[in-house]
Amino acid sequence: MPILIVAIGVLILLFLIMKMKLNTFVSLVIVSFLVAVGLEMELTEIVKTIEAGIGSQLGHLALVFGLGAMLGRLVSDAGGGHRIAITLINKFGKKRIQLAVVVASFIIGIALFFEVGLVLLIPIIYAIAKEVKLPFLYLGIPMAAALNVTHGFLPPHPAPTAITAAYGADIGQVLLLGTLIAIPTTIVAGPLFNKFAMKVFPTAYNKSGNLAALGPQKEFALKDTPGFGISVLTSLFPVIFMGLATIFSLLMPGESKVKEVIELIGAPGTAMLLSLLIAIYTMGYARKIPMKEIGSTLSESIAQIAMMLLIIGGGGAFKQVLVDGGVGDYVATLFSETNMSPILVAWMIAAILRLCLGSATVAALTTAGLVTPLLALSTVNPALVVLATGAGSVIFCHVNDAGFWMVKEYFGLSMKETFQTWSVLTTVISVTGLLCVLLLGVII
């Protein structure tokens, strides 16, 4: 049975990554070969399938991912993230400090990848918590919730962008509907979950964080950072370009040159390139930073994501093996006579793969390979299936995911406390996100 072959492949992948400590990309390629053989693919076609999977995955994603990393690093190194966080906190005041952290983290999380946002915000959150005499985790949980929600649901983050293309969904719709889902999900998983966790797991809230785990920190004097308005605008330009283009296309029926130009500007690659060029000016040239230094920042940002790009490519190879090996068609056959919505199917498969594989991105990409055939049998809006897949892919982060260890070390928690807070938090995000997607499915 194809499903049994895939299950064995997933177990081997877990063994290689968790027990053998083998590199994730290498493990994905090895398992792709083994699963391809197990599915009785033509031996002469296996390498072509793996190459096609890596190429197709990175072909449309590398541009967005690479430019996004550059944009995020420019905003971070210029102190734009620091300015956004501190300004919002000063405006909201101590009583609403948690809400300020959520808003700041959400804005920063749209532009920065989860790991980058975490590293950027933890020192700021630490300083604020110390200043206002609040437990570090009281502000850390809402921050991490907002970052994880944007990571799972919103382009230009890797998984939402990649599976949008795989499902043939409109990226602007994914962005707009994803924002509608992300806001209530962040509120539930951040401030509301925080109240519950403080009562049920009080010992975790006695911890004061571990800044030593972050290594040397770049410190900013507020007067030396870019203004709040330009920092927010620069961070959100990709969202603005893609969102406006989608709204314009919906409001302007028919074809025209103007519409074609607007849609070109709103395409992910173009939106990211234009946003990066603006950021080079606002976060660099306008602040009299030499172009040589700006160039170094851009180069360093790519070096940091090189392995992540390979892992995403490896996930694409595994996905392509599942597609070409007939697993997707087999799954489609299994569900062809079921009344279960592709939204639920996508969430369930992504959740299972997330628990097994650890990486939300790999889980989402693999799910896309299995669920895509189902969409041909359904009238469900593919944007909703993208968001359901994203929700499933972030469930119960645990020891096989790098994010688990980052939160444990940076927050200074024990293993038990990390499970009680972070693992439960990501499950709340996943379930709340699914419920919001199902609600949207009834409305639209």
Image (spheres, grey):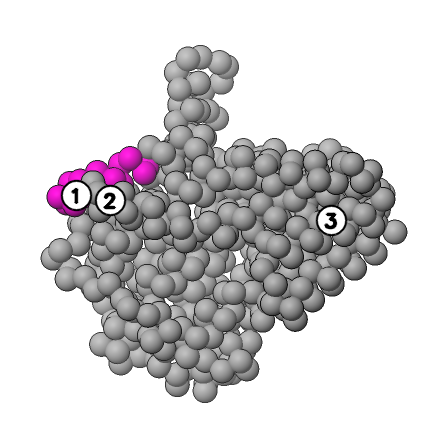
Depth check, front residue: 145 or 79: 79
x and y percentages locating residue 174 in the rendered image: 52, 40
- Which residue range is magenta in the image? 275-290
x and y percentages locating residue 150 in the rendered image: 45, 53
CA–CA distance in space, label 2 to label 3: 41 Å
Amino acid bearing label 1: Pro
Q: Earlier in the sequence, mark 2 or mark 3?
A: 3
Q: Earlier in the sequence, mark 3 or mark 1?
A: 3
Dot 3, crowdedness within 10 Å: few (<14), some or many (≥20)? many
Question: Visible in this render: residue 180?
Answer: no
Residue 278 magenta-highlighted:
yes
Task: Tell me the residue that label 3 is attached to.
Answer: 33
Q: Main secondary structure of the magenta part?
A: helix
**In the image, is 77 to the left or to the right of 8?**
left
Q: Name which quarter of the figure residue 325 lies in.
A: top right
CA–CA distance in space, label 1 to label 2: 6 Å
Amino acid bearing label 2: Ile
Residue 191, relative to residue 368: is it above or below?
below
Q: Which mark is residue 223?
A: none
CA–CA distance in space, label 3 to label 1: 47 Å
